[in-house]
Amino acid sequence: MAERLKPVDVVTIGVGLTGSLMALELAKTGLKVVGIERGAPRYTVPDFQSPAIHDELRFSIRKGMMQDNMKEAVTFRNSSDETALPIRRWASFLPGTGLGGSFVHWNGQSFRFQAADFIYKTHIEQRYGKKILDPELTIQDWGVTYDELEPHFDRFEYLCGVSGKAGNIKGTIQRGGNPFEAPRAREYPTPPMKEPYFGALFRKGAGSLGYHPYPQPSANLSQPYTNPEGLALQQCVFCGFCERYACEHFAKASPQTIILPTLLKNSNYELRTNCQVVRINLDSSRKRATGVTYADAAGREFEQPANLVLITAFPLNNVRMLLLSGIGKPYDPKTGEGVVGRNYCYQTTGGATVFMDESININPFMASGANGTMIDDFGGDNFDHGPLGFIGGQYVGAIMTGGRPIEFHPTPPGTPNWGLKWKQAVARHYNHTVLVQQHGTSTASRLNYLDLVGIILVIGLTGWSVTARVVRSQVLSLKERMFVERGRMIGSSNMHILLRHIFPNAFPLIFANTILTVAISILSESVLAFLNLSVKNNVSWGRIIAEAYQHDALTIGMTEWIIVPGLCIVFLVFGFYLFGYALDEILNPRLRRR
Ligand SMILES: Cc1cc2nc3c(=O)[nH]c(=O)nc-3n(C[C@H](O)[C@H](O)[C@H](O)COP(=O)(O)OP(=O)(O)OC[C@H]3O[C@@H](n4cnc5c(N)ncnc54)[C@H](O)[C@@H]3O)c2cc1C
Ligand code: SF4
């Protein structure tokens, strides 16, 4: 039974970017706000300091700052008729966990949307006619315009201290900035970052082709800056460990640098870390949220009543929380009805690796998460799509986020994947390679959506069917037997026949089958646990195997963590099978030995 806590005005589910930002605004107005964060508390000092924070294996490869997909699995499928499989190692999405959320390990690339993005459907139809839109695309206007949001973009950039060069101030195109951007009220709060050599090369090439290069807007700061909350940020030192890492230098905007020090001093705010919200509670009409239920690290459940519940848990988790709490109508791709999970958009990225002459030294290890030179000539609807038959575009730029030792080994096509030749190629190209990247439009479409996959429920709902079929055939056969016929002839009621003749004869079979079902259930649970689809924090042999596998027990020689629970499952299941068959033999009259 959850312990009911004192009501507050607002509760945020998660304390990442949106959770801390909204709490900052609301607590200032006098509202009592509680932030509930599933991960641990962490701060620039001492948690983000080097050398520990530059651990590439821990943070970049093993995704040390991200949602543990052993505990909270996300499944993925390419189309609705495929079986959704759990993502075992994050390659995309990379949702954060811990105080500050993903906004701790983000890159800092700080773009605004274009004006046309807000009225995308209207804009495209007006420019090209309705026929250009594929019926599978579910794009629509947002219901809010760029002009309405411009002051908020501005405020956010000044909160973060974004470094950049304006391209359009109140309709006047600015030299050196992005001429395609929508009008902004004023310059960026800090000047652009120092241009890296690879950026300068790109600028020269793109400029000579008539394009419009500009410095990437970045929340890795070009110079010291104090934000409107009075919080001081420092200059980026291009440490090369930025995206997927926290900043040790107070140089990247994050809740820890731009929000939390002020927020935590506000007596209207209370932070609760290591607490996982499990559902949003609703009133009897199921139309109004009344608070949340969460579990702390010790597994104790609490109910936190609140007038306002803000779902600020990262897009994937926001949708999951809504669906788990039974809020809104889940999107159905077949009918197009429902909104929860609809129109999920992510990223469309690509790029080219440019191998340069040995005289051109790039120094890729000197980099930040957001420092490059780019062009927007092919972005959004900045060029005529009419004759091309598609919509959308991409920015293109020389963007390199760090030549870190494990991940950055550029080699030309045809190079072997290992051995001496591979080593020689890495040595030759490491310092002489430029990555040209593109980041494209991700357009809403009918079949791109988020939902809950209820595999446990499916097994629960369908698992009984085998036993039911066996029992049904036994009952059908008993029904035709002479003793049942005789009972009917002497006027016994159906209930009497059922209780006195059918049930006693079918019972041994039901009992033996139930024992076999236990064995099947143990196996099913183990498989689900291995796939990360069992109940979170459930201790089971399947989960032990899964965690051992995930943490590379096979390669580091700790195979006993896989073999021992594996054998336990085999022996237990086998034992239940033998027990079930033995019971069947003893209780089933047809199999009983004379
Ligand atoms: C590697 C990476 C690079 C990125 N780079 C950029 C970039 O360059 N530019 C850009 O614009 N955007 C970038 N992003 C995206 C940006 O970081 C996110 O859009 C932003 O952080 C989302 O804010 P949020 O508040 O929704 O989620 P988050 O900041 O992730 O915060 C969500 C918080 O909720 C917590 N939580 C989740 N579920 C629960 C629960 N049930 N109970 C309690 N707490 C819960 C999480 O632990 C987390 O702390 C990047 C993201 C990643 C992962
Ligand atoms: S590259 Fe700059 S902003 Fe990024 S983590 Fe290093 S010092 Fe901080």
Image (cartoon, helix red, strand yellow):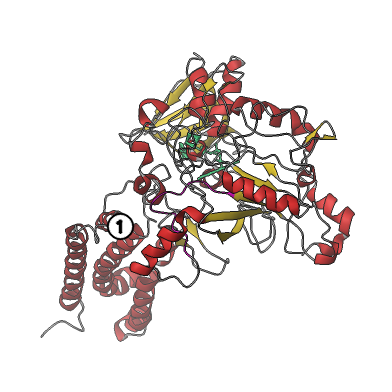
Please name whichever residue, 439 or 454, is drawn nearer the observer in this view of the structure.
439
Is residue 302 left or right of 120 when viewed as pictured? left
Residue 86 appears at what percent x and percent y? 43, 59
Is residue 74 left or right of 399 when viewed as pictured? left
Q: Secondary structure at mark 1?
A: helix
Question: Which three-letter amino acid code belongs to the residue tagged 1?
Answer: Ala
The answer to whether residue 409 is magenta is yes
Res 296 visible: yes
The secondary structure making up most of the magenta span is loop
- Report which residue position mark 1 lands on: 546
Please name whichever residue, 244 or 588, is drawn nearer the observer in this view of the structure.
244
Residue 409 appears at what percent x and percent y? 43, 58
Is residue 431 left or right of 152 when viewed as pictured? left
Please name whichever residue, 487 or 453, is drawn nearer the observer in this view of the structure.
453
Is the residue marked by circle 1 packed among few (<14), some (14-19), or many (20+) residues within 10 Å?
many
Res 455 visible: no
Residue 219 appears at what percent x and percent y? 58, 34
Q: Quadrant of residue 136?
A: bottom right
Residue at the left extreme of this rendering: 594
Q: Quadrant of residue 437?
A: bottom right
Q: Which residues are magenta?
A: 399-411
Residue at (50%, 21%) from the top-left corner? 7
